[in-house]
Image (spheres, rainbow, N blue to C red):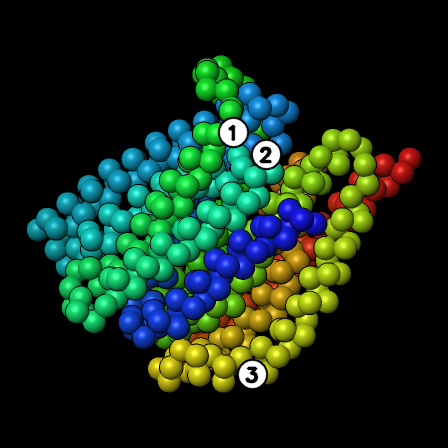
Amino acid sequence: MRDGITLVSGNVWAQVIAFASYLVLSRLFSPEDFGFYNVFYSYIEVLVIVSTCKYELAVVLADNDREAAAVSRLALRLNTVVSIALLTLLLVLCAVGRSEAFAGTRLATLDPKLALLVPPMVYFCGTSRVYSQLLNRFRKFRQLALSEVVGSTSGVLFKALFGLPRLAATLWHSIGLPLGTILGRICANINLAVKCRRLGLPRDTDRSERKAAAARFHNFPLFTMPKDLVNSLSYNLPFLWLALYFDKAEVGLFALALTCTFRPVNIFNSAFEKLLYVRVTEKVRAGKTISGDIRRFILTINAVALPVFVVAFIFGGDIFGFLFGDRWSGCGYYIRCLLPWVYVTLTSASLVFISNVFSRQRTEFFFYLMLLALRVASVVWGIASGDFRHSILFFALSGAVVNGALAVWYMRLVARYESNVSL
């Protein structure tokens, strides 16, 4: 319980800082700026999954520290190779986009100052995920919480600096949101790297050990990575696809509503998912029961969350307009659309590690394929009808339905394990 409080307290501070920053950033940057930023960040969330092939999740499952060191170095090297390849590709595309042969095509609209920020962001996000799992393995929850605060605080300071009125209409203001995020992630990575060096992991792992780790944990690139890739693509469809056909200001309203509703839940889920992943993995190795931990977690978070979500559904729009200003009052509709999906995700996303513990990633993958199909249908309907708001409503409802089904499936896996333990 103390570990959970440590993780959540650090994440809560990071969340308070991030939320408070939006009270300022929403007045320094326009809805259009937020719309473009979320389009940029949606690419990061998709590409970072490919950059490590999800091998970082195997760090907790490794049998010993040597194997953990081997699989972490494998993930770090993959991340470096993918980031460099991505940078090379974007440099070529930016050069091609400027040539006369492609004048008037979509390639000619490539914006190098934004496109070239993608590879460094992918690199630092990828390394951060690997370092976090190493600290998670060794139960260094206080250091994990501190890194969240460091990254959040520094990112906010950089964004606010680039958003100052004296920098308006300059290059620094136009890329202020993504550049501030990168610089904040760099600060968090420095903190994480220093802590990981103190873990005393073996540094002499060779190629054969990395290959053995890659073979043993092959389910992660084969099933977990495609599953997360499909999930991330479907989650970011409004920014990757729908945003091409609608006003960026409307996209920005949806983006801020999505951020302010999902950010607290994501940080909470991240903290407890790390804690439960380690605890449940250890108990499964020892052949102990796990249903009590899972049941207490679900009952506790739902007892706390339900009244909060009811109040947010009724008064969320008014509160949002008061906090962020009149030009953000249109976020109220999107908050009501998102809250059922967010509420279900509060449970399902915290239990996502269960498929890894029981090596059931293949079955889980089909849930996310179903989710992608439903969300593609909602986006296509929105484009065809020209109705952005109803498209987002159907998009959010599909997330609530599939995540609810996932939560039920996770509990069935737990029940099946419990029945075998009791024999």
Badge 3 marks a residue whose secondary structure is helix
Q: Which residue is mark 1?
A: 199
Q: Dots 1 and 3: beta carbons under 8 Å?
A: no
Three-letter residue code for mark 1: Leu
Q: Which residue is mark 3?
A: 315
Q: CA distance from mark 1 to mark 2?
A: 8 Å
Q: Residues within 10 Å of mark 2 (few under 14, many from 20)?
A: few
Q: Earlier in the sequence, mark 3 or mark 2?
A: 2
**Position of residue 149 measured from the top left corner of the image (x, y, whole percent):** 46, 53
Q: Residue at x 67, y 49 (%)?
A: 2
Q: Residue at x 80, y 49 (%)?
A: 292
Is 214 above or below relative to 19? above
Mark 1 vs mark 3: in front: 1
Residue 209 visible somewhere in the drawing: yes
Left or right of 43 in this view: 371 = right
Left or right of 15 in this view: 5 = right
Q: Nearer the viewer, residue 391 or 41?
A: 41
Q: Which residue is mark 2?
A: 138
Is 158 above or below relative to 145? below
